[in-house]
């Protein structure tokens, strides 16, 4: 027995300590050590001590290159390590958070709420110093906010008593992979090559290709014993082009491809084909006959269905907590920023044959890769499948540890500064074959005594703007527009004939239209795009907001009533000079 | 560029609203940047971009689309654009130029119509001044420059420069930053000018901050500028500066709080440079004598004495260095294709002329090469290298004795010595008080017995004309302030060079102060790992 025990014991010891040693980076150790000191010692006079502290560090190496017609427009690369500190005082039922107050920009040292720059190197002492000072600021701000919040509520009774923070079991998960290097010259070469596709296309007046890649590691530790490291790299190629019709109408569109890492972006030939498609589409649109106005049944296919879901439905599926404003001028704005679907839990928001599920654990759908997945969210909550809508009834919302009425706990969806979808599936309980769906559209058309129906195959996004002019007013916030531009629509006649229509927009479409979806296809398309967490919400100032990549799996959707019309506003005159490369 | 310019000029000059001037300027910036904080690397980036600026004018020199619309707040649109352009390929560049020129032309014709209407319906309070000056064509093609700013080497140096602060108690931030750029400009215009300039620049900046026990934040800042990395000081010089910063910060932390005060003061050369930049420089920028919302402080003082006879103030972008120090505000051509010129604004105390861009003002119809801007902005007249030249220089000691004499005369207990300043700002508008604020960081009281005492928490304030009338004499070492000046046409590099000056009366006010007290916990000692016993429920 003895010799055996001697052999086993060291091995056991190894098993227990080895993972911890291997995973504990210098950064993690510095965060843990300062966290412990904070929880034990940090207290201002007789004020309350923090009941919760977390540190989250985003390490990023990024590179970007932009080119036009085979020539470099600009490139950049950089590295950063940013710390976000969360300090909560009070208790989980009532603490310093969920208060909207004027942000203080005053002093160099006390910008609490803004991320702190940490050294790029693993310098333990310097990491501790930066974390110490950031914690100190965050704690003082937390005390200040808690007292402001108490003051606001002194003279009013809170009707809804929703806690400020939901409970969570501790969880640990570490991804020990190193951060990948990015080759800016490889990105540049790709941008140059793909952008050259537009050479010789005199009708395309502006074009640009932007290649971006980032390696990112998130390291997190909190006072409840949760810690994680997560690697989430991103890469994308965005191709933009624009043209102008003979009457001056401008057409702009883009195509974006995402990948997990830059090495896995599609190869050149595929990207060149994408650029050629884009050019072809613009040229066809440019020459297509104009449609003034159409109101009636519309079939959204493929990307178009997924994009209207992303722009109109997804912002309603996130649990937006409306903060208390300490200034009555902000109070109304706060109310407007809320999500009306919070009051629709249990109501029917889609037809009975549609379900919506978000699933960060899925890697692919049929053969297509899904890129929105992750193992653990930004608050250390394990990724989980969440059934949002069942048989058309809204069951819950994508949530974080910041509860809202009816959604008391996190379902692991905090990313990029707020609740965000991952891989979002719209699942038809009964789906139609493509032919059946078109017949369904045509029968609705007949019922309405219309000449033709409309099929929309593409819908634009804010990402479709030409980025070379970043003038004021070019920013668009998704979900707040009454017009969705960049639609590629076809007339569908009773005999099955299709005819492309010129530039149109979707007018006045909103989330309530989704209830009147008449039918959906059996098959679904995968569409990957960016989603800015907290959009349509009042979250913001304090958080590190960055867009996250989401994949949507959506069938074609037949809407009962949609208005499509020419864009409003004046049309600029066509250029006075011909394109310099047109030989004129 | 030339091809597209010619093609545009030819066609657009024949339009109903003919184009009469067109210029293209492309600014290529290749920048490298690294930052270390307390001996550890904190940031690094490299980038390159090329911005295109088009100045397109329709109408005529006398009246064109750029004339500000009167009676409207802001007077004239802020012509800010950020158009990036590919340069490496001629076809790609021509496509961009074509597209943007067309856009600009349409904007210009629309604007010209508005201008013409506005001229009819508003009061034109002076004889009609032209909108654009006539200038000679310039041809100058410089070699393309580059420099090796080896970031790996610099990262190591930055760490060494910022490391000594770790030994200093109560220093809460300490950064060393290197930023280098090569700016290449290509400029062509329809008057036949063709200019290419290529200019490397590099700046090493060290900043640190401490807090007094009452929560007041006390910064120190040192920066070194050169046109080439080899022009930056050696390690020993930088580390000496760092040691002085640490001593200053310790001194400032312990220094008594200054009281609001009026009385005599000496401004060091650097402090005086900033003082002149803010008080005088911004008020001799020509276009400010024209716009109806500007106060035009000096507009009616041409030919009058504004300073003692011994004082002259000259702006000269053609001087590139002063002894070993390169001057940031130097350039060969401004952003309107006009050669940079020496401009004596004040001679023997008398105001003689203004800094001119191609926007004429009353009495001055030509540019003197001060039409400057940051890429993406519309140029206006801006400062270059400011030199305060004084014919009878006192020694430092004489200046101090003069101050002490003034103390007795005015019955003051002490005067002030402004050793270093961080920068300043000024308002030149009509609707806000026409005042300035210079932000000193190291200020001493000088008592009648010659004793010096460091104080903290002062801002130097005042109104320009009053303050100017109090300047008495100058002396001591010549100081150089290299900085970036921000105004309506963006940030442009400038320098100010001056001896120390004695002012018979300045006014200081208390600095706005942070209410946040010192950190509650002592600094982490940086020793090894601590047992992780506190984590409840932590599972391994």
Image (tube, helix red, strand yellow):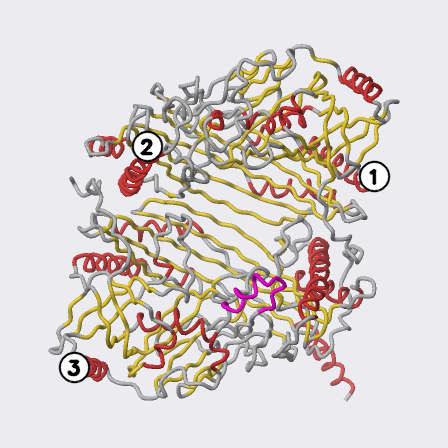
Q: Secondary structure at mark 2?
A: helix
Q: Secondary structure at mark 3?
A: helix
Residue A313 in picture, x, y percent from top left: 40, 74
Residue A346 in picture, x, y percent from top left: 47, 86
Q: Residues within 10 Å of mark 3 (few under 14, many from 20)?
A: some
| Residue ID for mark 1 | B256
Q: Quadrant of residue B104?
A: top left
Residue B480 in picture, x, y percent from top left: 63, 25
Q: Nearer the viewer, mark 3 or mark 2?
A: 2
Residue A22 in sight in this render: no
Host chain of mark 3: A
Q: Quick check: B211 left or right of A286?
A: right
Residue A488 in sight in this render: yes
Instruction: Name the residue: 36% across, 50% down.
Output: A189
Q: Is residue B8 above or below residue A288?
A: above
* Distance of label 2 from label 1 (alpha carbons): 61 Å
Task: Check the image and name the residue furthest to the right.
Answer: B449
Instruction: Name the residue: 56% across, 70% down.
Output: A322
Q: Are callouts 3 and 2 both on one chain?
A: no
| Residue ID for mark 2 | B120
Host chain of mark 2: B
The kind of secondary structure the magenta stretch mainly shows is helix
| Residue ID for mark 3 | A446
Which mark identifies residue A200? none
* Distance of label 3 from label 1 (alpha carbons): 88 Å
Query: Which contiguous range is marked in magenta?
Result: A323-337
Quadrant, the N terminus of chain A? bottom right
Q: Quadrant of residue B440?
A: top right
Q: Residues within 10 Å of mark 1 (few under 14, many from 20)?
A: some
């Amino acid at each position: 027995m003895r010799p055996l025990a001697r052999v086993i014991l060291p091995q056991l010891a190894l098993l227990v300590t080895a993972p911890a040693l291997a995973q504990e980076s210098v950064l993690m150790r510095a965060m843990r050590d300062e966290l412990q000191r904070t929880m034990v010692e940090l207290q201002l006079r007789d004020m309350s001590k923090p009941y919760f502290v977390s540190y989250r560090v985003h390490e990023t190496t990024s590179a970007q290159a932009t080119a036009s017609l085979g020539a470099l427009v600009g490139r950049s690369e950089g590295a950063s390590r940013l710390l976000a500190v969360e300090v909560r005082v009070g208790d989980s039922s009532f603490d310093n958070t969920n208060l909207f107050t004027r942000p203080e920009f005053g002093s160099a040292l006390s910008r609490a709420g803004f991320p702190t720059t940490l050294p790029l190197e693993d310098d333990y002492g310097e990491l501790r110093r930066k974390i110490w000072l950031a914690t100190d600021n965050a704690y003082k701000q937390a005390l200040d906010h808690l007292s402001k919040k108490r003051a606001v509520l002194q003279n009013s009774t809170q009707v809804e008593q929703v806690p400020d923070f939901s409970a969570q079991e501790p969880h640990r998960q570490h991804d020990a992979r190193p951060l990948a290097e990015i080759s800016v010259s490889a990105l540049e070469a790709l941008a140059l090559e793909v952008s050259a596709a537009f050479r010789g296309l005199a009708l395309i007046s502006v074009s640009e290709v932007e290649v971006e890649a980032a390696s990112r590691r998130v390291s997190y530790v909190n006072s409840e014993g949760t810690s994680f490291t997560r690697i989430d790299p991103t890469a994308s190629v965005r191709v933009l082009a624009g043209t102008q019709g003979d009457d001056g109408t401008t057409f702009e569109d883009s195509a974006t491809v995402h990948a997990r890492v830059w090495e896995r972006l599609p190869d050149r030939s595929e990207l060149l084909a994408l650029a050629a498609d884009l050019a072809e589409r613009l040229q066809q649109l440019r020459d297509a006959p104009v449609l003034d106005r159409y109101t009636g049944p519309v079939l959204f296919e493929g990307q178009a269905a997924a994009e209207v879901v992303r722009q109109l439905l997804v912002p309603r599926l996130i649990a937006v907590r409306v903060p208390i404003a300490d200034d009555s001028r902000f109070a109304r704005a706060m109310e407007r920023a809320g999500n009306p679907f919070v009051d629709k839990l249990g109501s029917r928001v889609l037809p009975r044959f549609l379900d919506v599920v978000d699933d960060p654990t899925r890697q692919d759908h049929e053969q297509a890769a899904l890129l929105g997945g992750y193992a653990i969210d930004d608050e250390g909550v394990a990724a989980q499948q969440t059934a949002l809508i069942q048989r058309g009834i809204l069951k819950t919302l994508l949530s974080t540890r910041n509860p809202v009425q009816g959604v008391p706990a996190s379902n692991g969806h905090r990313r990029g500064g707020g609740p965000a979808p991952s891989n979002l599936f719209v699942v038809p309980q009964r789906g139609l074959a493509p032919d059946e769906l078109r017949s369904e559209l045509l029968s609705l058309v007949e019922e309405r005594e219309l000449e033709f129906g409309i099929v929309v195959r593409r819908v634009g996004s804010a990402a479709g703007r030409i980025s070379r002019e970043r003038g004021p007013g070019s920013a668009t916030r998704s979900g707040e527009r009454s017009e969705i531009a960049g639609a590629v629509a076809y007339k569908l006649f009773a005999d099955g004939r299709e005819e492309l229509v010129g530039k149109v927009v979707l007018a006045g479409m909103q989330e309530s239209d989704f209830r009147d979806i008449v039918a959906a296809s059996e098959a679904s398309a995968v569409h990957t795009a960016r989603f800015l967490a907290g959009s349509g919400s009042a979250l913001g100032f304090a958080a590190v907001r960055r867009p996250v990549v989401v994949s949507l799996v959506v069938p074609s959707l037949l809407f009962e009533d949609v208005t499509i019309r020419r864009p409003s506003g004046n049309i600029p005159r066509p250029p006075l000079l011909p394109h310099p490369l047109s030989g004129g | 560029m030339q091809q597209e310019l010619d093609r545009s000029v030819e066609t657009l000059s024949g339009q109903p609203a003919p184009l009469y001037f067109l210029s293209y300027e492309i600014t290529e910036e290749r920048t490298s940047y690294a930052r270390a904080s307390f001996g550890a690397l904190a940031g690094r980036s490299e980038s390159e971009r090329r911005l295109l600026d088009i100045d397109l004018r329709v109408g005529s020199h006398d009246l064109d689309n750029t004339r500000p619309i009167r009676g409207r707040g802001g007077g004239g649109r802020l012509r800010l654009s950020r158009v990036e352009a590919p340069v490496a390929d001629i076809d790609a560049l021509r496509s961009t130029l074509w597209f943007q020129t067309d856009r600009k032309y349409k904007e210009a014709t629309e604007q010209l119509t508005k201008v013409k209407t506005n001229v009819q319906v508003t009061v034109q309070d002076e004889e009609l001044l032209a909108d654009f000056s006539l200038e000679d064509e310039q041809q100058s093609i410089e070699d393309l420059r580059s420099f090796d700013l080896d970031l790996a080497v610099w990262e190591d140096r930055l760490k060494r420069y910022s490391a000594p602060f770790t030994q200093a108690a109560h220093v809460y931030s300490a950064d060393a930053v290197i930023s280098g750029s090569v700016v290449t400009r290509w400029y062509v215009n329809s008057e036949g000018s063709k200019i290419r300039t290529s200019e490397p620049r590099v700046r090493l900046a060290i900043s640190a901050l401490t807090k007094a026990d009452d929560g007041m934040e006390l910064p120190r800042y040192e920066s070194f500028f050169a046109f080439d990395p080899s022009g930056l000081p050696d390690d020993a010089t930088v580390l000496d500066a760092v040691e002085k910063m640490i001593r200053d910060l310790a001194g400032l932390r312990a220094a008594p709080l200054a009281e609001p005060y009026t009385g005599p003061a000496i401004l060091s050369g650097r402090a005086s440079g900033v003082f002149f930049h803010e008080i005088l420089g911004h008020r001799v920028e020509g276009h400010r004598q024209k716009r109806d919302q500007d106060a035009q402080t000096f507009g009616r003082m041409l030919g009058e004495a504004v300073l003692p006879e011994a004082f002259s103030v000259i702006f000269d972008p053609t001087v590139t260095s002063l002894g070993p120090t390169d001057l940031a505000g130097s350039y060969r051509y401004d952003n309107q294709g006009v050669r940079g010129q020496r401009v004596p604004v004040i001679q023997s105390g008398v105001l003689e002329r203004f800094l001119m861009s191609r926007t004429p003002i009353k009495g001055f119809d030509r540019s003197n090469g001060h039409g400057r801007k940051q890429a993406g902005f519309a140029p206006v007249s801006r400062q270059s290298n400011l030199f305060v030249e004084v014919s009878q220089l006192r020694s430092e000691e004489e200046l101090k004795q003069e101050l002490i004499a003034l103390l007795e005369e005015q019955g003051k207990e002490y005067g002030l010595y402004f050793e270093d300043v961080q920068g300043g700002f000024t308002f030149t508008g009509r609707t806000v008080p026409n005042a300035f604020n210079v932000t000193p960081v190291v200020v001493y009281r000088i008592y009648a017995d010659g004793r010096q005492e460091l104080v903290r928490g002062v801002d130097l304030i005042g109104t320009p004309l009053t303050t100017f009338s109090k300047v008495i004499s100058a002396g001591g070492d010549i100081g150089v302030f290299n900085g970036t000046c921000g105004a309506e046409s963006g940030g442009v590099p400038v320098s100010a060079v001056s001896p120390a000056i004695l002012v018979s009366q300045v006014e200081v006010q208390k600095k706005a102060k942070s209410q946040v007290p010192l950190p509650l916990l002592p600094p982490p000692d940086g020793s090894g790992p601590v047992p992780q016993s506190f984590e409840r429920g932590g599972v391994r």
